[in-house]
Amino acid sequence: MAEHYHCFVDPSRVAHPKDKGKVERDVQTVREQFRKLLTLSPDLNIQKANQLIKKWCIEEYGQRDHGTTHLKRVQILSATINKSALFTPKFLQINRVI
């Protein structure tokens, strides 16, 4: 895929969270939300947890303004997905909407 887009994949080092700070911050935020859900509902199963986290990501976290662009995170993600779909090779395209 990197060859298709004429780019270089530069993986970050394992166990070095400062190499990928923006991603690590989002992981921490989702982890905190999951812990809240688990505290409120100790008998939570994986299917229900996935439903609740997905809903939270779209309806709450996704509606917050991004610190730099001041756009809603859901808008940024939608625009990125729609734009990248135009340039994705046919064999990699997935016909599924979040």
Image: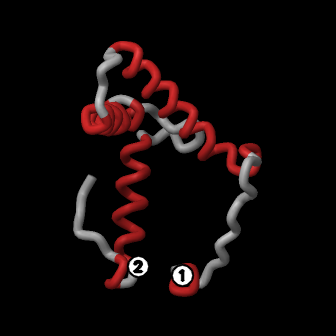
Which residue position holds label 1? 5
Looking at the picture, the colour scheme in use is: secondary structure
Residue at the image point whose x is 34% and y is 64% from the top: 82
95 left or right, relative to 53: left
Residue at the image point whose x is 43% and y is 27% from the top: 34
Residue at the image point whose x is 37% and y is 44% from the top: 74
Which corner quadrant of the image does residue 84 belong to? bottom left
Residue 59, percent across and down? 30, 33
For the residues labelled 2 and 1, the Cα–Cα distance comes to 8 Å
Q: Helix, strand or loop at disc 2? A: helix
Front position in the image: 50 or 65: 50
Which corner quadrant of the image does residue 22 belong to? top right
Residue 10, percent across and down? 70, 68
Which corner quadrant of the image does residue 38 belong to? top left
Which residue position holds label 2? 87
| Badge 2 amino acid | Phe
| Badge 1 amino acid | Tyr
The residue furthest top is: 40
Local packing at callout 2 (Cα closer than 10 Å; few below 14, some 14-19, many 20+) is few
Residue 89, percent across and down? 38, 83
Mark before the other along the chain sequence, 2 or 1: 1
Front position in the image: 27 or 46: 46
Label tally = 2
Q: Which mark is residue 19?
A: none
Marks 2 and 1 in Cβ contact (< 8 Å): yes
Residue at the image point whose x is 32% and y is 32% from the top: 49
Local packing at callout 1 (Cα closer than 10 Å; few below 14, some 14-19, many 20+) is few
Q: Is 6 drawn above or below residue 25 in the view shown? A: below
Q: Is 76 drawn above or below residue 25 in the view shown? A: below
Q: Helix, strand or loop at disc 1? A: helix
Residue 83, percent across and down? 39, 67
